[in-house]
Amino acid sequence: MSRPRLLMMNGRLIPYEDARVHVLSTAMKYAASVYEAMRGYMSDADGQLYVFRLREHLQRLQRSAKIARIPLPADPARLEAETLEVIRANELREDLHVRLIVFVDTEDGGLMSREPVGYVIAPIPTARYFAGSGLHVAISSWDRISDNAMPARVKAAANYQNSRLALLQAKTDGYDDAILLNSDGSVAEGPGYTIFLVRDHQPMTPPVTSNILEGVTRATLLTLFRESLGVDVEQREIDRTELYVADEAFFAGTAAEVTPILSIDRHPVGDGTMGPLTAKVREAYFHAVRTGSAPHPEWRTPVYA
């Protein structure tokens, strides 16, 4: 993965090598940070680079910061402008992964430190996160964190220790990835992406009350299923064994995009290949992120306007 020359840090463009936070900062000591991860896509049709659903990501950042009691150091309009500015400053015209991190930058601060708050915006040139035709996944023995402990709807660095444990276990056991269940045994999500499955031609996904991140890609796909495929997604609690009898399944997220799941706990999903509804919604998704003629052009913010 290549690196950009410049990052945006606290409203200033600085060289990549100069972006530093003290090792005893509250962010480092106590994981006091929230963040967003966004995608930028080049459009072959007009040679323009677009950030996908930038405003929706910034809205979610506001919600995460509110729950975590971390004051945002800049308003969404400024963060939007600076996101576009740092991409332009790097003269990037390729697919990107853009990370915007807000963190408590108190040097040797205490557990309750809340200021000063810093932020950094990093546009990273990137290719597809998942290569290959699909994933072989395991149901993790680690439970998904709960809303009354470490709310999963907050996109926070601290929450990803839960994801990290599940993914490391899956990799050690010979799988590509993992699915986490709630403490009550119902399906939650993957380590960094939501999950959809299809049973008897009916797509379904866990509700936002199942201890999942309220995904921007998830919301995009709910719209695309309805508008492009003419199918409503059922949002309900899903039992573990429903995964074993699913006709199709896939992960969805900013990094994962739409990635088929081929087997779960060595049970083939359907015939072990990408299913027809997955293929159709995947095509609709890439059409939406890359094509100006897609039904929701407002989802794409041009960088070089």
Image: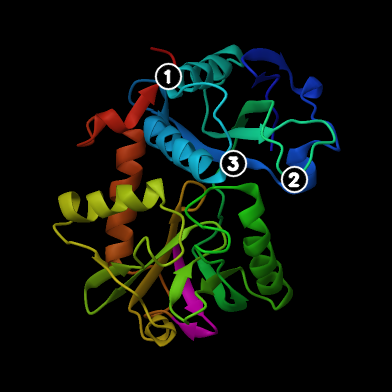
Q: Residue shown at 55%/74% (left/top)?
A: 137
| Picture coordinates of residue 257, whole percent (x, y) | 44, 50
Residue where numbered disc 2 is placed: 111
- Could you tell me what secondary structure mostly forms the magenta stretch? strand
Numbered badge on residue 34? 3
- Residue 255 lies, with reference to residue 17, above or below; the image says below
Q: Is residue 56 left or right of residue 100?
A: left
Tag 1: residue type? Ala
Residue range (magenta): 260-268
Residue lying furthest left: 230
Closer to us: 15 or 64: 64
Residue 293 falls left or right of residue 122? left
Q: Secondary structure beneath disc 3?
A: strand
Q: Does residue 159 appear in the picture of this structure?
A: yes
Three-letter residue code for mark 3? Val
Q: If you read the primary sequence from the N terminus, does the residue marked by circle 2 or circle 3 appear first? A: 3
Q: Position of residue 96 (x, y in %)?
A: 54, 33
Secondary structure type for disc 1: helix
Residue 198 in the image: state x and y as whole percent: 30, 73
Is residue 293 positioned above or below 217 on the image? above
- Where is mark 1, residue-wise? 77
Give the distance between the C-alpha atoms of the residues marked 3 and 1, in whole angstroms. 18 Å
